Image: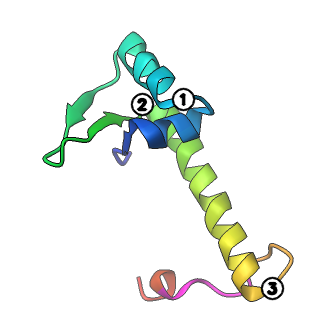
Amino acid sequence: MAQIWLSYDELAETLGCTAPQARHAAIQHGWARMKGRSGTSHVRLPSEMTARYMLRQLALVKAMLAEADGSRGEITRPPGWLAAA
């Protein structure tokens, strides 16, 4: 499975908490953490959370496409970047 690294802010959004609470959860659960060159710390999602995160991202993309197309949430065509792959 793919590795997904999130900042504490992104992790907090996924978990529905604050960034300090997300940091505490990452430390408490022993999730891999690292600081990038930009100085931003990132947490690697455990495999059981990766699916949850990806489903949430898919829902956001569907909502954006529905808004852009004016449809009722059904994807009638794949986005250009997906069709080209």
Q: Camera-side residue: 32 or 34?
A: 34
Element carrying mark 2: loop
Q: Is residue 77 left or right of residue 1?
A: right
Identify the amino acid type marked 3: Gly
> Disc 3 marks which residue?
70
Label 3, secondary structure: give it. loop
Whether residue 81 is situated above or below residue 63 in the rendered picture: below
Where's residue 47, x and y in %? Answer: 44, 34
Give the residue at x 54% y 51%: 54
In front of the other: label 3 or label 2? 3
Do the CB atoms of the residues marked 1 and 3 lie less than 8 Å apart?
A: no
Cα gap from disc 2 to disc 1, whole angstroms: 19 Å
Tell whether 69 sits left or right of 39.
right
3D distance between C-alphas at marks 3 and 2: 36 Å
Residue at image position (41%, 14%) is 29
Q: Position of residue 84 (x, y in %)?
A: 43, 88
**76 magenta-colored:** yes
Q: Which residue is mark 2?
A: 46
Classify residue 65 as left or right of residue 70: left
**Res. 59 image quadrant:** bottom right
Quadrant of the drawing holding the N terminus? top left
Q: Indicate the amino acid at tag 1.
A: Thr
In the image, what residue occupies the spot 34% across and 35% down?
A: 44
Residue 30, percent from left and from top: 34, 15
Amino acid, disc 2? Pro
53 lies above or below 47: below
Start-end of magenta stretch: 75-80
Q: Is residue 16 left or right of residue 81?
A: right
Location of residue 22 with respect to 47 vertically, above or below: above
Q: Which residue is mark 1?
A: 18
